[in-house]
Amino acid sequence: MCNSSRREFLKTTVTTACSAGLSMWGTSELIADSHASRSTLPTPPSAPLPIKKGVLLEMLPAKLNYADRMKMARDVGFEVIQAPTTPDAHEAEEIKKAADGANVRIDSVMNMDHWKDPLSSSDPAVVEKSLAGMRTSLHNAKLWGSDAVLLVPAVVNPQTSYREAWSRSQKEIRKLLPLAEELKIVMGIPESVDPGLVRRWECAALRLSAGLDSHAGEEHRQSPLERLQAQARRIRVGEPR
């Protein structure tokens, strides 16, 4: 009776263990098959980025007329054009007609006077010339159906310190805001790789310069992250310069 019970117990134990082992093996196989199936499933196509390939109008052959330049840009695959400031009204109309005829959009304007006649100059005549050029650029943008005008806000040189460039450019940019708002054109402030212009960690502040005063610079001993954090604190609290 005792031996029979022992044999039955062992038989039951071995059967249970084998069943459990087979079950676990089968489950692991199913899991592996499931992972393999998922890895071989085709990845759904991602939505295309809303980025269009563009070219500066002045990079196209100057020997061609505007109509042929626009057609060349379209034929080689460019979808948008950045055109320069064009003071002559007839020439601006010609550019518009050429772009429309080639089905190429002028999406932005490259302001042309901000380098040689910077907004940060101490000479009022130079500043006024720069403002006039920017106003022309804004009107060009409106005519061409563009979204934005690229504006380099300041130039640092032996006559203009970084701090002077910062404060002067903010003052002059504010004068342009009413016209930009009226025409519904964005004034784009680029992040310059030249440390003599706008440092990367200060671009946000300068872009908000119409309603914000902020420190012009950070200590060189700070890391880029520390500079960013310091600038962000000043923007939030509106710390005076």
Image (tube, rainbow, N blue to C red):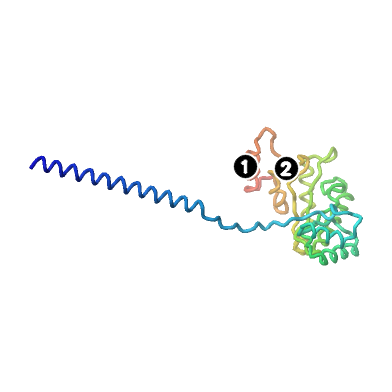
Quadrant the N terminus occupies: top left
Q: Residues within 10 Å of mark 2 (few under 14, many from 20)?
A: some
Q: Is residue 191 left or right of residue 113?
A: left
Residue, x 32% and y 49% (percent of image)?
A: 23
**Residue 236: % across, % down:** 62, 48
Looking at the image, which is closer to me, 143 or 20?
Answer: 20
Q: How many marks?
A: 2
Q: Is residue 50 left or right of residue 57?
A: left
- Find disc 2 in the rendering and name its residue: 199
- Find disc 1 in the rendering and name its residue: 229
- Identified by mark 2, the residue type is Arg
Q: Secondary structure at mark 1?
A: helix
**Residue 58: % across, % down:** 85, 53
Residue 154 appears anywhere in the view = yes
**Residue 180: % across, % down:** 77, 60
Looking at the image, which is closer to me, 135 or 160?
Answer: 135
Residue, x 21% and y 43% (percent of image)?
A: 13
Q: CA distance from mark 1 to mark 2?
A: 14 Å
Q: Is residue 45 left or right of residue 94?
A: left
- Identified by mark 1, the residue type is Gln
